[in-house]
Amino acid sequence: MRYSAQAIEEMIEPYMPAEEGYQKTVLAAMNYAVKAGGKRLRPMMLRLCYEMFAKTKDEAVVRPFMAAMEMIHTYSLVHDDLPAMDNDTLRRGLPTVHVQFGEDMAILAGDALLNFAYETMCGAFLAKPGDVNVEKAFLTMAKKAGIYGMVGGQVLDVERAGMPMDEDQLAFIYENKTGALIAAACMSGAYLAGVDATMAAQIEEMAYAVGLAFQVQDDILDLIGDEAVIGKPTHSDDKNHKITYVTVHGMEKARAYVEEMSNKAIGILEKMEVWDEEAKGDMIVLVKSLIDRDR
C-alpha cells in the first residue's frame, strides 16, 4: 500500500481549524473528534480512486476533498454517539465528544464539521475555477451525505429501532447509512480525475458493495469483537434494540455476505481500465482487508 492511515492523516491535518477565538471550545471539539485516530478509509479510497484515473495530480484539488470527506464522516460519528442516538461513551478508544465536551458542544461540533467540510471543499473551486469535474465531485459529496444518502439511512435506522424490518428496509439503511459515504468518497475522487458517467456508475456499484461488506462486518464485530481492539463498546446494537443483518440471518450467513460483497467489489475493480494500475492494486488490497479486519 502506498498510503498508510498516518500518511492520509498528514494530508488532512493542515485543513483543520486553529483553536482560537471565542469559539475555541467548539474548534477544540472538532479537532478532538477528527484527530482521535481511525482507519481514514474514506479519504484513502477517495485518494486512490483519484489516482487510478488522474493522468496528472493536482493536490490543491484532491486534498481539500479528502479533508472534507473525513470531516463529514467524523461529524456523523459525533452525532451518532449522542445520547439521543446510540448513547455511546467510547469511540476510537477515547471518550466520545459529548462525554469529553458535553452534549451541547458535541451537537455544535458535529454541525461545525459538516459546515467546515463544505467550506474546505470550496478550496478546490478556487484552485480550478469553473471546472465541471470539481462541480460533479462537490454535488456527489453533498447528495450522498444528505437526505438522499447517509442522513436518509439514519432516519430509518432511528425510526425502526426495536421494530421488525423487512429486507428492503434493512438494505435501505445499510446502503445509505454506510454505503453512501463510501460511494461519495470513491465517486468524488474519480470525478476529480475526469471520469465519464459510465465509469462513475461502475465505481458507484463497487463502492456500495464495499459499504455493505463494511457494515455487516461492523455488525459481526459488535457481537464478537474485543472492545479494547475495536475502540468502542460492543453489543451497542443490542443495547439500542437495533435489527442487523446478523440478527436476521445469523453469523454464518453474515460472514458469507461480507465475503460475497467484498468479492463483488474486487471483481468490478479488476475489470476496470485505469491509468494507474498500482493505485487499483492498492484499492483491491484495501477491500480485501475488510474481510479479515478485527476493528
Image (cartoon, helix red, strand yellow):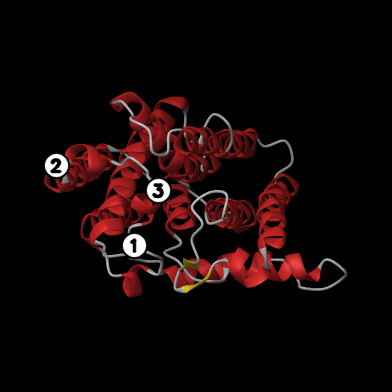
Which residue is at the front of the view, 52 or 151? Answer: 151
Give the amino acid type for the residue marked by disc 3 in the picture.
Answer: Met
For residue 253, which quarter of the picture? top left
Work out whether 89 lies above or below 265: below
Q: Can you give x and y, in whole percent of width and height, for residue 30 in the image? A: 66, 64
Which residue is at the front of the view, 237 or 45? Answer: 237
Quarter of the image with the C terminus in it: bottom left
- N-terminal label among 2 and 1: 1
Residue wearing tag 1: 234
Residue wearing tag 2: 253
So how many labels did they put on this image?
3
Q: Classify mark 1: helix, strand or loop.
A: loop
Q: What residue is drawn where x is 66% and y is 49%?
A: 114
Q: Classify mark 3: helix, strand or loop.
A: helix
Q: CA distance from mark 2 to mark 3?
A: 33 Å
Residue wearing tag 3: 52
Q: What residue is drawn where x is 33% and y is 40%?
A: 243
- Answer left or right for 200 relative to 170: right
- N-terminal label among 2 and 3: 3
Q: Alpha-carbon neighbours of circle 3 within 10 Å: few (<14), some, or many (≥20)?
A: many
Give the amino acid type for the residue marked by disc 1 in the picture.
Answer: Thr
Q: What residue is drawn where x is 49% and y is 33%?
A: 159
Quarter of the image with the N terminus in it: bottom left
Q: CA distance from mark 3 to mark 1?
A: 36 Å
- Answer left or right for 283 relative to 142: left
Q: What residue is drawn where x is 67% and y is 37%?
A: 131
